Amino acid sequence: MKKHNFSAGPCILPQSVLKQASEAVLNFDNLDLSLIEISHRSKNFVAVMEKARSLVLELLNLEGKGYTALFLQGGASLEFLMTPYNLMKNEGGKAAYTNTGTWADKAIKEAKLFGEVAVIASSKDKNHSYIPKNYTIPSDVDYFHCTSNNTISGTQMKTFPKFDGVTVCDMSSDIFSRELDFSQFDLIYAGAQKNMGPAGTTLVVVKDEILGKTGRTIPSMLDYQIHISKDSMFNTPAVFPIYVSMLTLQWLKDLGGIKAIEKINNEKAALLYAEIDSNPNFKGNTATEDRSIMNVTFSLTDDNKKEAFDKLWNAAGINGLNGHRSVGGYRASMYNALPLESVQALVNVMKQL
Amino acid sequence: MKKHNFSAGPCILPQSVLKQASEAVLNFDNLDLSLIEISHRSKNFVAVMEKARSLVLELLNLEGKGYTALFLQGGASLEFLMTPYNLMKNEGGKAAYTNTGTWADKAIKEAKLFGEVAVIASSKDKNHSYIPKNYTIPSDVDYFHCTSNNTISGTQMKTFPKFDGVTVCDMSSDIFSRELDFSQFDLIYAGAQKNMGPAGTTLVVVKDEILGKTGRTIPSMLDYQIHISKDSMFNTPAVFPIYVSMLTLQWLKDLGGIKAIEKINNEKAALLYAEIDSNPNFKGNTATEDRSIMNVTFSLTDDNKKEAFDKLWNAAGINGLNGHRSVGGYRASMYNALPLESVQALVNVMKQL
């Protein structure tokens, strides 16, 4: 049976990418060797790494603007720590964070180990069901950090505050999903396992000129400047996750890039939110103006219908619809590779309840 | 043509493992979903993680001895940093290291950021072509660190010094290759991409009781105790590399475990070293008693024969035989999955020169 995969991450990837990845595990580039048993310094893999890095800058329209794309390890969780290591001054360091969800909260916790952290806006009072607005970023901070999309609660920043200083954004769950002026950010990071590839690699896009200014001693593996100087190959990179990310980025480019996928993403979101709003059995969990186009969180208006609804969507081949354990309810994650027909299948099931 | 893959890492993996991995990328556990598009918290992947962790302890004969196996990210290079973070006292921290090669040198460099590092033995004077012996480990150090096998130079520790304190070993390039009393170590780490799996995950085996004693504040992602408390799932793990590692560990168990593979590894090494010693065209690069059974480094006695030799082994389908750029010559990496017939193919070619 055809599965409709609404998993929150790791998540659905394009079928054509999975097919190519599966073949490369047996025989890569007609080398009669597997992708995962050749040297990462072979010309074949170096070409993969370089293509992945250049596709990132091309898709984000950041080519020739002083940015470097890196494929590191450790997920966004390691970036929570690398951000202050690389950007917070050793003496009197200070940063401003918005707390818009579980992951932002974790980022704040790690940054506090390095200096003063001003949480300048928070949605914790309402279980992160909205995006705080109208806050002021202090001019004296080393950097401002925000989270563009909150995977668990299902909210998304639609605009970003103007700030003259260094701006950092965790885009783990919505990068490559919508057009933005990405040059408004100086550091973007994202775990691969949503819109880019399998778990095991982390994309970092950094404006080179912001680095090397903290007076802090940085261990080699946590130092963006070292990774830049080694073309993202300071040590053995996560070969397979990077290869699949490259294939997915190429798939996105062939599709027409971010502009094209955003149109589809908006259609998917409009279809599902319309059903949530018009069907008396359901209600959305978040403030309407802050609704994520990636992670749609909703609940039953009558919890007694849970068994019936769960039976319906399971029978329809729908996968990964349970809400995060910390918020309950349902969550439909609709990343780039999820087709509109899967959303239609979910809507059909909702209508049947 | 059948390839003989002597790559230094990422390296050859068992063909049966590659086949299973390739299939899982298309359809895992008959879920009609790819391994890389399901939640890492699904029961199917949790079972993979738990099986991989328990196979490690079983194969190393460390079950029930107070050890935990973790599958982290960042390679040995991140462990160079996590070791002092977790084991070196915050006040007056001190550690003893042996410098037996390039990677040991890098481990020392990172440890120095955290406290005093006594390099108690070094083979740097002879380009790391031997293993230093008869050194004394100071009793007042927080831990002693050594590297069991030196991938680049081709030397291997055959015995380990007796030490009552905390003993740490980087076993990246020879773990699971030979029987040892692994309980003499308190912390073992190894990048997966030699004897265990593809690049992208790092095995850490740690004796729980040594942790939490430094008085140091450790960022979450670098804290072994946090990873232990979360069953190696503090954040999204490297799903595919861990799955392939599990398959490879199962392959090794089915083969008869470390005892069985050590016998084969010794046969492979004996075959190649015998040819190096008896063929006047070649000479070994390392002290005879310290020769690695994993990475065999050798040179031509007459460099004028390089073109002829390179032509011969390339024509025989041999791959990955060039020495590391820092030492030159040749290196035959003969990890667990390399069959004896590949070594025989190399020896045949050497005889033809």
Image (cartoon, coloured by chain):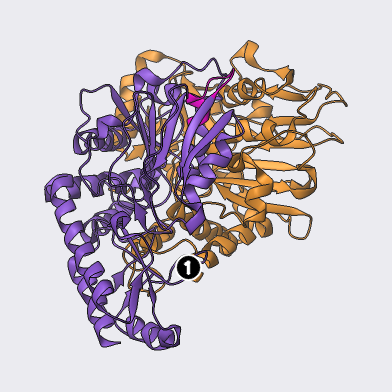
Chain colours: A orange, B purple
Image spot of residue B311 (x, y percent)? 38, 86
Q: Which residue is mark 1?
A: A42
Q: Is residue A338 visible?
A: no
Image spot of residue A34 (x, y percent)? 34, 64
Is the residue B260 above or below the residue A303 in the image?
below
Horizontally, is B279 left or right of A323 in the view?
left
Bounds of the magenta segment: B83-93
* Residue drawn at x 79%, y 56% as measured from the top left: A65
Dividing the picture into quadrants, the one containing residue B202 is top left
The chain that hosts pointer 1 is A
Q: Which three-letter amino acid code belongs to the residue tagged 1?
A: Ser
Q: Is residue B87 magenta?
A: yes
Check disc 1 and report its element: helix, strand or loop: loop
Q: Is residue A68 magenta?
A: no
Horizontally, is A310 left or right of A158 in the view?
left
Neighbours of disc 1 within 10 Å: few (<14), some (14-19), many (20+): few
| Foreground residue among A277 and A99 | A99
Image spot of residue B186 (x, y percent)? 34, 28
Horizontally, is A232 left or right of A344 in the view?
right
* Residue drawn at x 53%, y 24% as measured from the top left: B220
| Foreground residue among B105 and A224 | B105
Q: Is residue A97 visible?
A: yes
Image spot of residue B142 (x, y percent)? 47, 23
Dividing the picture into quadrants, the one containing residue A29 is bottom left
